[in-house]
Image: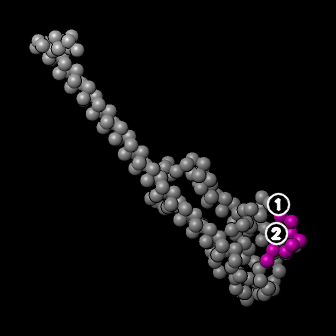
Amino acid sequence: MDSLKNFVSDDFGKAIFTVVGTLLVTGFGVWLGAFKEIFTDWWKRRRQARYHAMLLAVTLDQLVDDCMTAAFDDGIADQEGERVRTSANPAIVWPDALDWPLLNTEVMYRCLLLPGMIKSAIESLAFIRRTLPVRRTMRSISMSASIDLPLSVCRHFICLSGSRAITA
Protein backbone atom coordinates (compact mmCIF):
# COMPACT_ATOMS: atom_id res chain seq x y z
CA MET A 1 0.00 0.00 0.00
CA ASP A 2 2.90 2.33 0.70
CA SER A 3 4.24 1.80 -2.80
CA LEU A 4 0.90 2.86 -4.25
CA LYS A 5 0.91 6.01 -2.08
CA ASN A 6 4.43 6.81 -3.27
CA PHE A 7 3.43 6.20 -6.91
CA VAL A 8 0.40 8.49 -6.67
CA SER A 9 2.25 11.21 -4.76
CA ASP A 10 3.74 12.82 -7.85
CA ASP A 11 1.83 14.18 -10.89
CA PHE A 12 2.89 11.38 -13.25
CA GLY A 13 1.53 8.72 -10.86
CA LYS A 14 -1.73 10.61 -10.45
CA ALA A 15 -2.16 10.82 -14.23
CA ILE A 16 -1.46 7.10 -14.72
CA PHE A 17 -3.80 6.18 -11.85
CA THR A 18 -6.54 8.40 -13.34
CA VAL A 19 -6.10 6.94 -16.83
CA VAL A 20 -6.16 3.33 -15.58
CA GLY A 21 -9.22 4.04 -13.42
CA THR A 22 -11.00 5.74 -16.32
CA LEU A 23 -10.21 2.82 -18.65
CA LEU A 24 -11.50 0.30 -16.12
CA VAL A 25 -14.74 2.20 -15.55
CA THR A 26 -15.21 2.80 -19.30
CA GLY A 27 -14.47 -0.87 -20.09
CA PHE A 28 -17.00 -1.99 -17.50
CA GLY A 29 -19.57 0.43 -18.93
CA VAL A 30 -18.96 -0.84 -22.48
CA TRP A 31 -19.22 -4.45 -21.30
CA LEU A 32 -22.42 -3.67 -19.41
CA GLY A 33 -23.90 -1.88 -22.43
CA ALA A 34 -23.01 -4.79 -24.74
CA PHE A 35 -24.54 -7.27 -22.30
CA LYS A 36 -27.72 -5.17 -22.17
CA GLU A 37 -27.93 -5.05 -25.99
CA ILE A 38 -27.38 -8.79 -26.33
CA PHE A 39 -29.97 -9.58 -23.67
CA THR A 40 -32.48 -7.10 -25.12
CA ASP A 41 -32.05 -8.53 -28.65
CA TRP A 42 -32.38 -12.08 -27.33
CA TRP A 43 -35.56 -11.18 -25.41
CA LYS A 44 -37.06 -9.34 -28.39
CA ARG A 45 -36.26 -12.22 -30.78
CA ARG A 46 -37.78 -14.69 -28.31
CA ARG A 47 -41.00 -12.66 -28.12
CA GLN A 48 -41.14 -12.35 -31.92
CA ALA A 49 -40.58 -16.10 -32.31
CA ARG A 50 -43.46 -16.79 -29.93
CA TYR A 51 -45.72 -14.40 -31.85
CA HIS A 52 -44.87 -16.01 -35.19
CA ALA A 53 -45.33 -19.49 -33.71
CA MET A 54 -48.82 -18.45 -32.59
CA LEU A 55 -49.51 -16.98 -36.03
CA LEU A 56 -48.42 -20.28 -37.58
CA ALA A 57 -50.58 -22.26 -35.14
CA VAL A 58 -53.65 -20.18 -35.99
CA THR A 59 -53.02 -20.67 -39.72
CA LEU A 60 -52.61 -24.44 -39.29
CA ASP A 61 -55.71 -24.53 -37.12
CA GLN A 62 -57.66 -22.91 -39.96
CA LEU A 63 -56.30 -25.58 -42.34
CA VAL A 64 -57.45 -28.32 -39.94
CA ASP A 65 -60.90 -26.73 -39.78
CA ASP A 66 -61.06 -26.61 -43.59
CA CYS A 67 -59.97 -30.27 -43.76
CA MET A 68 -62.62 -31.30 -41.25
CA THR A 69 -65.27 -29.39 -43.20
CA ALA A 70 -64.22 -31.15 -46.41
CA ALA A 71 -63.99 -34.55 -44.72
CA PHE A 72 -67.47 -34.39 -43.19
CA ASP A 73 -69.20 -32.69 -46.12
CA ASP A 74 -72.17 -34.86 -47.08
CA GLY A 75 -72.62 -32.83 -50.22
CA ILE A 76 -75.80 -32.32 -52.17
CA ALA A 77 -77.30 -34.43 -54.93
CA ASP A 78 -77.06 -33.07 -58.43
CA GLN A 79 -79.54 -33.80 -61.26
CA GLU A 80 -77.91 -37.16 -62.01
CA GLY A 81 -78.12 -38.30 -58.39
CA GLU A 82 -74.40 -37.91 -57.70
CA ARG A 83 -73.26 -36.28 -54.52
CA VAL A 84 -71.37 -33.07 -55.15
CA ARG A 85 -69.48 -31.48 -52.34
CA THR A 86 -70.50 -28.13 -51.00
CA SER A 87 -67.17 -27.21 -49.44
CA ALA A 88 -64.04 -26.15 -51.27
CA ASN A 89 -60.79 -28.07 -51.23
CA PRO A 90 -58.67 -27.17 -48.21
CA ALA A 91 -56.00 -24.61 -48.95
CA ILE A 92 -53.43 -22.88 -46.83
CA VAL A 93 -52.60 -19.20 -47.16
CA TRP A 94 -49.57 -18.08 -45.21
CA PRO A 95 -49.92 -14.64 -43.61
CA ASP A 96 -47.64 -11.96 -45.04
CA ALA A 97 -46.56 -11.05 -41.52
CA LEU A 98 -45.07 -14.52 -40.93
CA ASP A 99 -41.28 -14.22 -40.58
CA TRP A 100 -40.03 -17.70 -41.49
CA PRO A 101 -36.40 -17.38 -40.26
CA LEU A 102 -37.66 -16.88 -36.70
CA LEU A 103 -39.11 -20.41 -36.69
CA ASN A 104 -37.36 -23.70 -36.12
CA THR A 105 -35.94 -25.00 -39.42
CA GLU A 106 -37.68 -28.38 -39.15
CA VAL A 107 -41.04 -26.72 -38.50
CA MET A 108 -40.43 -24.25 -41.32
CA TYR A 109 -39.53 -27.07 -43.75
CA ARG A 110 -42.60 -29.14 -42.91
CA CYS A 111 -44.92 -26.13 -43.15
CA LEU A 112 -43.54 -25.08 -46.52
CA LEU A 113 -44.18 -28.62 -47.80
CA LEU A 114 -47.90 -28.43 -46.96
CA PRO A 115 -49.15 -26.57 -50.07
CA GLY A 116 -47.39 -29.08 -52.34
CA MET A 117 -48.76 -32.00 -50.35
CA ILE A 118 -52.29 -30.61 -50.55
CA LYS A 119 -51.94 -30.08 -54.31
CA SER A 120 -50.60 -33.62 -54.74
CA ALA A 121 -53.48 -35.07 -52.70
CA ILE A 122 -56.07 -33.16 -54.71
CA GLU A 123 -54.55 -34.32 -58.02
CA SER A 124 -54.28 -37.92 -56.79
CA LEU A 125 -57.88 -37.90 -55.58
CA ALA A 126 -59.03 -36.49 -58.93
CA PHE A 127 -57.17 -39.32 -60.70
CA ILE A 128 -58.78 -41.94 -58.47
CA ARG A 129 -62.22 -40.42 -59.09
CA ARG A 130 -61.67 -40.55 -62.86
CA THR A 131 -60.45 -44.16 -62.90
CA LEU A 132 -62.85 -45.84 -60.43
CA PRO A 133 -66.56 -46.30 -61.08
CA VAL A 134 -68.87 -43.96 -59.18
CA ARG A 135 -71.93 -45.09 -57.21
CA ARG A 136 -74.83 -42.95 -58.43
CA THR A 137 -77.10 -43.05 -55.39
CA MET A 138 -78.37 -40.64 -52.80
CA ARG A 139 -76.65 -42.52 -49.95
CA SER A 140 -74.17 -40.75 -47.75
CA ILE A 141 -70.64 -40.48 -49.00
CA SER A 142 -68.34 -43.28 -47.93
CA MET A 143 -65.37 -45.13 -49.29
CA SER A 144 -66.13 -48.75 -50.11
CA ALA A 145 -64.38 -51.28 -47.88
CA SER A 146 -63.38 -53.23 -50.98
CA ILE A 147 -60.85 -50.61 -52.07
CA ASP A 148 -57.42 -51.33 -50.65
CA LEU A 149 -55.44 -48.13 -50.83
CA PRO A 150 -51.89 -48.08 -49.48
CA LEU A 151 -51.37 -46.21 -46.23
CA SER A 152 -49.29 -43.54 -47.97
CA VAL A 153 -52.21 -42.70 -50.27
CA CYS A 154 -54.73 -42.71 -47.41
CA ARG A 155 -52.54 -40.36 -45.41
CA HIS A 156 -52.64 -37.81 -48.26
CA PHE A 157 -56.42 -37.99 -48.44
CA ILE A 158 -57.05 -37.52 -44.75
CA CYS A 159 -58.17 -33.94 -45.26
CA LEU A 160 -59.61 -34.36 -48.73
CA SER A 161 -62.46 -36.83 -48.45
CA GLY A 162 -64.32 -37.52 -51.65
CA SER A 163 -67.01 -35.34 -53.10
CA ARG A 164 -68.57 -38.47 -54.61
CA ALA A 165 -68.81 -42.00 -53.32
CA ILE A 166 -66.17 -44.22 -54.91
CA THR A 167 -66.68 -47.97 -55.11
CA ALA A 168 -64.85 -50.79 -56.78
Q: Which mark is residue 131?
A: 2
Residue closest to the far left: 11
Magenta stretch, overall SS:
loop
- x and y percent of residue 19 in the render? 19, 21
Tell me the crowding category of disc 1: few under 14, some 14 to 19, or many 20 or more residues within 10 angstroms, Cα based.
Answer: few
Going by the image, does 145 lie left or right of 31? Answer: right
State the residue at coordinates (77%, 61%): 153
- x and y percent of residue 18 in the render? 17, 21
The total of numbered circles placed on residues is 2
Alpha-carbon span between mark 1 and mark 2? 16 Å
Amino acid type assigned to the residue bearing label 1 in the image: Pro
Indicate the secondary structure of the residue bearing disc 2.
Answer: helix
State the residue at coordinates (24%, 29%): 25
Looking at the rendered image, the disc whose residue lies closer to the viewer, 1 or 2, is 1
Going by the image, does 36 lie left or right of 139? Answer: left
State the residue at coordinates (59%, 52%): 107
Location of residue 68 by image quarter: bottom right
Instruction: Assign the N terminus to one quadrant of the image.
Output: top left
Nearest the eye: 32 or 146: 32
Query: Is any atom of residue 123 visible in this view?
Result: no
Indicate the secondary structure of the residue bearing disc 1.
Answer: loop
- x and y percent of residue 142 in the render? 79, 77
Q: Which residues are magenta?
A: 142-149
Which numbered disc flags the more N-terminal residue, 1 or 2? 2
Nearest the eye: 84 or 61: 61
- Residue 144 is covered by the magenta coloring: yes
Query: Is any atom of residue 136 visible in this view?
Result: yes
Check contact, mark 1 vs mark 2: CB within 8 A: no
Going by the image, does 153 lie left or right of 29? Answer: right
Amino acid type assigned to the residue bearing label 2 in the image: Thr
Residue corresponding to mark 1: 150
Instruction: Assign the C terminus to one quadrant of the image.
Output: bottom right
